[in-house]
Amino acid sequence: MKKIINGIKRYPFIIVLVIILLFFTPFALFSPGESRRRAIVIAIGLDKLEEEYEISFLTFIPKPNQEFEQSNSVVSGKGSSVSEAILDAQLTLGKDIGLSHAKTTVVNEKMLEEDVSSSLDYLSRVISLPENTVFVCTNTSAKQLLMATDSLEKNLGLKLDQLISYNANDVYITDTSLEAFYKGYYSPHKSSIIGFIEHVKEESSGGGQSQGSSGSQEAQSGGQSGGEQAGSSNAGSSGGGSAVASSSGQETSEAGGEQSEKQRGSLQGQSEILNKADAILLREGKKVAKLDVDNLNSINLLSEKHSLDSITVENVKCECGKTVDMTFLLKNKQVAIQTDFQNGVPLFIANVSIGVQLTEIDTKGQEIKQNAQSTKISDEIASKLEMKIRSEFAQMLKILRDCKADVMNVYANFFKNDRKKFENFLSSLDDREDYLNHITFMLNMKIRQDG
Amino acid sequence: MKTISARQTGIIVFLTILANKILVLPSILYKNSKADSIFVMLALFFIEFLILLVFLKLKKNYPNQTFLSILQKKLGKIIAKTIIFVFLVFFLFKTMLTYSVLFVYLKDLVYQDEFGFLALICLIPVINHATIIGLRSMSRTFEMFYYLVVVGIVFCLAIAFFTDISTPILFVSPVSSLFASAWQGLFAFGDYLVLFIFIDRITIKKGEAKKVMLFALVGVIFVLAIFTIFYSKYQLTSFMHNNALADLLVFSVQFNAIGRLDIIAMLTIMTLGLFQLEIFLTAFCDCFVMVFSKLSIKYATAVFDILFLVIYLVLIAKYEVMISLATSILPYLAIVASYLLPILFYALSFKHKREVKDEENH
């Protein structure tokens, strides 16, 4: 005993350690789990009602189950400011809000009529909210989208942020996170792109009997929608593909039938998420245009990363001499951007070399015996392809010029390459922000066959 | 006397170089001088290297003497103790700033609730203990964790390259902004000064000075890499991000599926913060013992705890106040401690011929 006491005397920090252990161990043992005190938010929805904000949280509810299903719920709160709305939601939930795992922030389209950054101010100040939170807009209300998202996950096993990440990586190319929005917002051109997810709500007639019939209809449409979703990955340029999930739930006819049986009692209407990979063009935080997949593909023409684009050329003569429609996949793009000034006029020169691969021939009912892989791309086909790409690029450029929105890094390229001349050019303009209209764009294209 | 090797000295230099520069400083400097802050950092690091050379020269000429005795011999007791007292105040505020930045980082990203009491009860006894057991044991611990810290930083930097980055736009700020930035960042520098305090406990054999320089160079490269990648990644929104090293990991949609990668940054920053606090507290306590020679290191730690609690918790109380102090008033202290005094030390590093003769005779 004496030895122990002497040992403790020699190392008094053992006493400190024991005191700390004695103090904190009971707290650690008897305090409730963190999830009881804090709600784990995985998506945030923000709606502006007439005079107040409504914030909705898609929260993850940790509970043991044997189905490997994640159970979520949507909780919302209202207030004259976003922070008040959050407090209201906390009261409703009976828990603190933890935003560290929030990966999606949704606002409704109406909010984009005004500068949305003022509504997002609270979120930009919350340090616990990750910067890579995907920023999305929806046509109805953010709350409804979050509710439909829950079923998207249940039925298709697809999380909203996964869907958006797919769009961001393969369609938008430019980052569509909250951080990227702010980057664009604070840039000289004040423009950015955010994702758009369409939410369709069809009111059913309500009541038990009619719900039953709607359930069976849903089951049928579910089969179709599943097919559409599967096809959407290759339908980049056509814009026809859409990932559809109904909150009544359907992936296949059978599964959909079961799901709708389960949820029949709880849902008043049918609600669907339509992902057409559209995007919203923002300037000074306000919506200035809605971009479809073709517009996005044209913007991404100048990005080497982008490969999800296919183009159909109509009425071209194939090697056998017959007139057909041909669809090509654009791949292995090489892009070199140059900037120059000729007589004080800025030139934005894009040298694009595109590899194309023939993927489909629409024979229009004619009998053609031709191997698609060995088909050579004639000068006529190459010229028509080029024309089509150019015309789509011109259309997109017109939108950007009209909106004074530079999402192709034109400003940054000129600023990096020829800062002084560009500054002089800008100061010579009546409206400095209208520089896109005064820049000449040159698109030098080279189309090559890629196996 | 228990001394530390050149390698351990180098690791201390490496750790202190990273102090207060890898979290909030890039964001503070960006407000004034945008991405040109990298040039400000380069200039300040260049001066730091000169100070390191002054130290090495002083060490070469006075290999076994304490810092106080060198000063006393040349300048007299009162001036020597006054200089040490300036260092004492300098390291007290350095510790406070390091604690403040670390505390806010942990509060924001790990704990989220107020946990001031918890942080104090965890950190203060540990850093007190490290100071009391001595520089040698502390340095051994640093040696053990050195590669862990290096891997953590390299990981954060490497992950940043997997996301979209573009070269930062340079040469956009006027010279006045660069000076304003340099002024704001001044108190985050002056890290090598701890070496002057520990001078008698450092053993640098012939040819080992390069080793110390190499560690310093690695530290500088890391800080500059963090600044460059941070500005490349965030560009115009750099002013919004207060935790540079941690934020390098999080801004990427591609990594959303992986989860919270920033836990790597958290562990690295926590380890770094703890070690830096230990070094600065040891420097403070050594200064205290030099000024009040009759008191032991234990009294020094007790005095630090009291001063820390009174000044930091009662008078400063807020992170914003601490940052504002560090960027407006404390640079005056930094000018004296980190620039004027090293010039004096440079003058002192030359031995008079009489001193050399005396030593030879002795």
Image (cartoon, coloured by chain):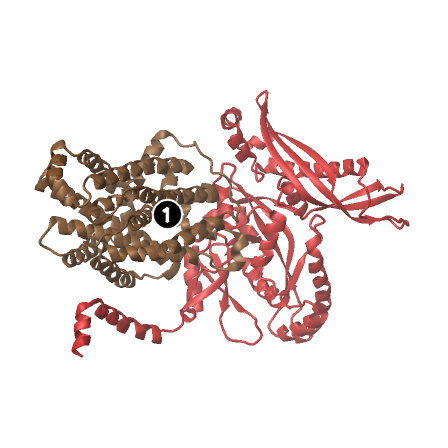
Q: Position of residue A433 (x, y in %)?
A: 53, 33
* Amino acid on which disc 1 is placed: Ile
Q: To which chain does the residue with label 1 belong?
A: B
* Residue lying farthest to the top in this orientation: A343
Q: Which chain is brown?
A: B
Q: Which chain is red?
A: A
SS for callout 1: loop
Seen in the picture, residue A113 relative to A424 is either above or below; the reply is: below
Depth check: give the residue in front, A11 or A450. A11
Q: Is residue B335 left or right of residue B155?
A: left
Res. A176 visible in picture: yes
Q: Position of residue A43 (x, y in %)?
A: 51, 60
Res. A121 visible in picture: no
Seen in the picture, residue B280 relative to A152 is either above or below; the reply is: above
Q: Identify the residue position indicated by label 1 in the image.
A: B22
Q: Quadrant of residue A385?
A: top right
Q: Is residue A50 left or right of residue A257?
A: left
Q: Is residue A331 left or right of residue A75?
A: right
Residue drawn at the location 35% of the way across and 62% of the way down: B113
Q: Position of residue B332 (x, y in %)?
A: 23, 38
Seen in the picture, residue A133 relative to A22 is either above or below; the reply is: above
Depth check: give the residue in front, A229 or A371. A371
Assign the C terminus of chain B to one quadrant of the image. Answer: top left
